[in-house]
Image (spheres, rainbow, N blue to C red):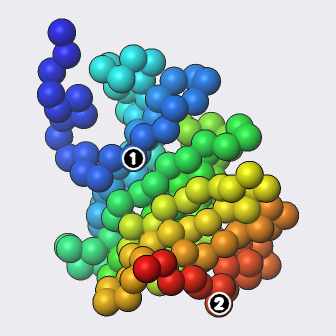
Amino acid sequence: MHSNPILPGFNPDPTIVSTPDGYYVVTSSFEYLPGLPVYHSQDLQSWELIGHVATREEQVHVANVPTPGGVWAPTLRYRDGVFHLIVSVFLGGRGCVLFTATDPAGPWSDGIVIDAVDGIDPDLAWDEDGTAYVTFARHPDAIQQVPRGPGDRDGPGGAQAALAGQRTLLA
């Protein structure tokens, strides 16, 4: 018999991904560090905290973020042996940041800021040819989407340059 909630305590906005090694959940952490806790489960009932995506202030810049801001609504994905976590760091943080890791327990990358994504609640998905799409909300505009090509790399001239100025409004 399992109990609810399966992740007791402060674990808002969960995102989950299934991998060959089990299930992983990451939750919002707002202005707190370490941030973006990572949980693992084999059965969707028993969960273990295995690490955090953001372990250093430089990754998220939340030191001066007011209480309603910080790291909101992450989206966790797993593709080709790599974990991808995209998140908005709202109200004074880094903006939209994409982190990657081959081990979900860490270490995670320093993250790259995606300037073209200037809203909240980013989602990450790939099409058949490997192009990634970040879909996000930006009030008062419609939901928007920016592509990221299959050859783009995380780092200087990578995802940030690939996404800059390529916004599509989804009606």
The secondary structure type at the circle numbered 2 is loop
Identified at 29% across, 53% down, the residue is: 13
Q: Position of residue 62 (x, y in %)?
A: 37, 72
Identified at 79% across, 79% down, the residue is: 157
Residue 24 circle label: none
Left/right of residue 133 with respect to residue 17 in the rendered view: right
Q: Position of residue 83 (x, y in %)?
A: 61, 45
Left/right of residue 41 with respect to residue 115 in the rendered view: left
Nearest the eye: 102 or 5: 5
Identify the image quadrant of residue 104.
Answer: top right
Seen in the picture, residue 22 relative to 86 is either above or below; the reply is above
Q: Which amino acid type is marked by label 1? A: Thr
Q: Give the spatial CA distance, label 1 vs label 2.
A: 27 Å
Q: Which amino acid type is marked by label 2? A: Gly
Identify the image quadrant of residue 132.
Answer: bottom right
Q: Position of residue 121 (x, y in %)?
A: 39, 67
The secondary structure type at the circle numbered 1 is strand
Per the image, the residue denoted by label 1 is 15
Identified at 33% across, 55% down, the residue is: 28
The residue positioned farthest toward the top in the image shown: 1
Instruction: Answer with mark 1 or mark 2, whichever residue precedes in sequence.
Output: 1
Per the image, the residue denoted by label 2 is 165
Left/right of residue 48 with respect to residue 85 in the rendered view: left
Left/right of residue 2 with respect to residue 23 in the rendered view: left
In which quadrant of the rendered image does the C terminus lie? Answer: bottom left
Seen in the picture, residue 90 relative to 125 is either above or below; the reply is below
Label 2 crowd (10 A; few <14 / some 14-19 / many >=20) = few
